[in-house]
Amino acid sequence: MDHRTLLADLATDLPQVVRLQRLVDHLRMRFHCGAVALLQLEEDHLRPVAVDGLVREALGRRFAVGQHPRLAAILARREVTCFDHDSTLPDPYDGLLDTLVGEPLPVHDCMGISLQVDGQPWGVLTLDALQTGTFGEAARAALADCKVLVEAAVRISRLEREVQALRSAPHARSVDDERATRAGDGDMEIVGQSEPLLRLVHELTVVAGSDLPVLLLGETGVGKELFARLLHRQSPRSARPLVHVNCAALPESLAESELFGHVRGAFSGAVADRPGRFEAAEGGTLFLDEVGELPLAVQAKLLRTLQNGEIQRLGADRPRRVDVRVIAATNRNLREQVRDGAFRADLYHRLSVYPVPIPPLRERGNDALLLAGRFLELNRARLGLRSLRLSPGAQDALRRYPWPGNIRELEHVVSRAALKALSRGAARNDIVTLEAALLDLDGLQAPGTSTAPHASATPPLPPAAAATGPGSLAPCTLRDAVDDCQRQRIQAALARHTGNWARAARELDIDASNLHKLARRLALKD
């Protein structure tokens, strides 16, 4: 790559992803190296935005600066930083080169440089060469010369993104503000590059500028809360509170008080006035998760609030004005609930002014690998491992699996496989490679389970063991057997009550909030 190639790209109208990918591709050819990565700084971690020579799931990883001394050293200096072949500092890309899948990096050269945009740290550019001596004085000088053009490419990409965001949603905050909020959310980041996801994010960015109610529709585990947070972050209300209410966890007798508040003496135990969640969200956004679980009596009051912008505390004589935007979410078919009399038709029409279907993971292509990369890095840090990655067979298995439990199920699969690898003798100082067998995806899907897009959002059960005698039971721990039995009982009760959690809880003789906690532990819901 010469400067003319880079300059030509700078003058060309290219999507951000394409521009930055072409940049790292050119750099890899120019410096004859094994891998190039462009990583953006977000709070205390570095996020890969374009890579060449690394496995695809590397794009989903987040490298905590404090855990990777090479990246920290590059970030701390303005000049080119080199690590010779005898450097003892661990390499963040161990096991991630696409030509050495799962193998430790051999003796090699590494160099990198920190990048700034508008006088502020933006991230780093790293180059790895498997041939020692590749990065001599000439290569280091050439990288220093390229720095200005690389920073220009990054700056242009950022400006184009800001312009697009302003055109889509004039009231949205800047990219820097959005990035800072996202980073502060920790694990609440939306990861993926698939076309369905990018279309969805663009649509939500446009909708965020209005005060219209939004109804998020999607299966269990697709991340509805993440998209509600995105709507709030991009809205003019972003400086005000986002209040999350899990409607399914509200006891029926207290649901009205929780949402609208109560006055002293309104009921036994009401010893003082208490504002509800609507008042807590004043000026901001109220996120009603699992809105289909609200009792009918509370639905009537919610409808009045949406119509008039007023609430009335339980036991109060006069209403109060509130300024709150409502975002609702459900994994159930509210039209069917309206038909069955379990949900008010007028409330359904009020909430679904702008319905947004969220695509399941099986429709998002290679996003499963990027998400797996995110969960692999989290587990690597949590378990204190040198490196944690997927074998090629495991990657293929992740692509093929239909993910009835979506992203939540993927997270559990990766975490469980990492623990299994350790329990079977993997050393923390090794490159731990997760094989397909460790993922145990075949055991997660019962025979005949539907994988159609509108199949039940509840994860399938493992096949029940035949109870014809002690010798016929499949080997498993007592805890696993109890968990399987509980899953079956809960799913059967939900099926009998068309997915109504409150009614299922009454049948099972368990408090509704405890049932939801148990269902989350059993991976039956978010």
Image (cartoon, rainbow, N blue to C red):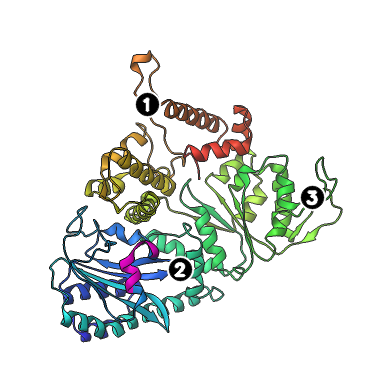
**Disc sitting over residue 43 in the figure:** 2
Q: Is residue 260 left or right of residue 517?
A: right
132 sits to left or right of 72 = left
Q: Who comes first in sequence, dot 1 or dot 3?
A: 3
Q: Disc 2 versus disc 3: distance between alpha carbons? A: 41 Å
Q: Which residue is mark 3?
A: 262
Inter-mark Cα distance, 1 to 2: 43 Å
Left or right: 244 with respect to 266?
left
Disc 1, SS: loop
Quadrant of res 266: top right
Q: Disc 1 residue type? A: Cys
Q: Are marks 1 and 3 in contact (CB under 8 Å)?
A: no
For the residue pair 33 and 323, the one nearer the viewer reads as: 33
Q: Position of residue 8 (x, y in %)?
A: 25, 84
Residue 324 image position (x, y, % from top left): 68, 62
Closer to the chain start, of discs 1 and 2, is: 2
- The answer to whether residue 338 of the structure is visible from this angle is no
Residue 289's spot in the image, x, y percent? 58, 50
Q: Which label was assigned to residue 115?
A: none
Image vertical order of residue 345 relative to residue 126, above or below = above
Q: Is residue 9 above or below residue 87?
A: below
What secondary structure prevails in the magenta region?
helix
Q: Mark 3: give few (<14), some (14-19) or many (20+) Cα within 10 Å.
A: many
Which quarter of the figure has residue 284?
Answer: bottom right
Q: Nearer the viewer, residue 226 or 208?
A: 226
Q: Which residues are magenta?
A: 66-74
Residue 82, placed above or below residue 318 = below
Q: Looking at the image, is mark 2 or mark 3 earlier in the sequence?
A: 2
